[in-house]
Amino acid sequence: IVILLIFLGIWRTSDRAINFVGNLFKTQPINPQIENQTLIVQRIKSMQELTTTVQTMETIVPTSADRKLGDISLATTRLLYIARGEIRAGVDLSELKASDIKVNNNQIDINLPPAKMLDSKIDVNHSRVYDYDRGFLNLGPDVAPQLQTLAQRKTLTEIVKTACNEGILNAANIKAESIIAQLLTNTSFQQVKINTTTPENCEVI
């Protein structure tokens, strides 16, 4: 009986050892994992302001100033300024929140913030005073710097207005959608849906 019990114990121990070795080399099923929304938000927000559209325009801006005696204009100074301006539009990804991302199995939906005008500036290297005339006998006020500054302000106003009328924010939305979709092509999601938001207004922040 003692010998039989010893043999039975050895048999049970060897059986467990064989099962342990078998489980050790057994192939486990692959369970795909969905990335956490927070990690996706951090990846996208790392791009900060996403400039998707840059528009450059050139315009001729006339400005003038009068030298007056009471209500009478004695002489007029005229300045003609050729200005080149640049507008940047895109999406401020710092506004993206975790609630803007929805994950369902292998599909991800992202609601992007609306596109906006990010910056407008004068390209001083490609802008110049075309003509400066102080009138008869140079009696007009010598105010070239003031007139040039005024011309630059007018230029910025005009190029922003023109860019808005030409749909620069809609173009920025379309490009932002494409760029974010490409950013997520190497993730575990089989379907990526990017939703853009219609801009409420068109002005430089």
Image (cartoon, rainbow, N blue to C red):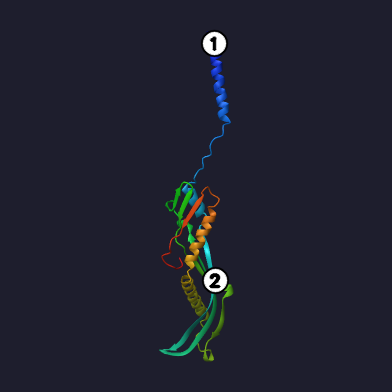
Q: Is residue 101 above or below residue 67?
A: above
User: Alpha-carbon distance for marks 1 and 2?
Assistant: 95 Å
- Furthest toward the top, the residue is 1
Q: Is residue 47 visible?
A: no
Q: Which mark is residue 136?
A: none
Q: Is residue 169 above or below residue 1?
A: below
Residue 70 versus residue 27: which sits nearer the camera? 27
Figure quadrant of the C terminus: bottom left
Residue identified by numbered label 2: 56
In the rendered image, residue 79, in percent from the top left (x then y), is placed at 52, 83
Q: Amino acid at mark 1?
A: Leu
User: Residue visible at 50% across and 59% down?
Assistant: 177
Indicate the secondary structure of the residue bearing disc 1. Answer: helix
User: Residue visible at 51% across and 49% down?
Assistant: 190
Question: Which label lies toward us, 1 or 2?
Answer: 1
Residue identified by numbered label 1: 4
Classify 10 Å Cα crowding around label 1: few (below 14), some (14-19), many (20 and above).
few
Q: Is residue 63 visible?
A: yes
In the rendered image, residue 17, in percent from the top left (x then y), is placed at 56, 23
